[in-house]
Amino acid sequence: MFSFSRIVNFYETDSMRIVHHANYVKYMEEARIAWARAQGLMDFQDIQAASQFAVIDCHVSYIKPALFGEELETFVQARVQKAKIIFEYKICSKTRNQLLLAEGRTRHVNVSEDLRPQQPRGNLIQIMEKEKWIETWLLNL
């Protein structure tokens, strides 16, 4: 299972040192890009292809608040489902013994230059077909 770690910055929090809810979507995106890099998908051609994947929905279930200075670990799983690419995420606090803070899911569709949906192409399909997927992985979505 792929994971990405980062420290919560002060600017991501409110006056009580609690992470603003919008930042969890950013944490998921950072983990998704780190996953792509780890898969070798970040050369120029792949970046162009990745920019043609539109987010069609995003869900986040907030379980516990993340705090300033805390080390977060975001776990990612990915799969292709027909023309869609689905990512699921678990955001945990490494600082608090892997306490589950949030779960999320994003769905993406590959679009052509005229913004029409099309099947994903290239080595992304082969990479994602090899990914392990756990159906019951998320508990709160």
Image (cartoon, rainbow, N blue to C red):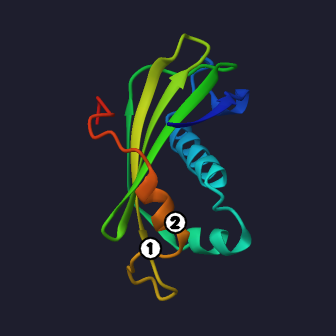
Q: Nearer the viewer, residue 67 or 16?
A: 67
Per the model, the C-alpha gap separating discs 1 and 2 is 7 Å
Horizontal side of 89 relative to 32 (left or right) equals: left
Residue 70, above or below 103: above
Q: Which residue is the extreme one toward the bottom?
A: 114
Sort mark 2 into few (<14), some (14-19) or many (20+) by Cα contacts within 10 Å. Answer: some
**Marks 1 and 2 in Cβ contact (< 8 Å):** yes
The residue at the far top in this view is 97
Name the residue at 47% across, 64% down.
126
**Image quarter of the C terminus:** top left
- Does residue 68 lie above or below 137 as drawn? above
- Mark 2 residue type: Leu
Q: What number is the disc on residue 124?
A: 2
Identify the residue at image location x=40%, y=84%: 116
Measuring from the top left, give residue 59's x and y in whole percent.
Answer: 36, 45
- In this view of the protein, can residue 100 be seen by the observer? yes
Q: Position of residue 102 (x, y in %)?
A: 43, 29
Q: Looking at the picture, which amino acid does disc 1 mark?
A: Pro
Q: Residue at x 29, y 30 (%)?
A: 140
Residue marked by disc 1: 120
Q: Is residue 34 shown above or below 47?
A: above
Q: Estimate how packed mark 1 is, as few (under 14), some (14 to 19) or many (20 or more) residues with alpha carbons within 10 Å.
A: many
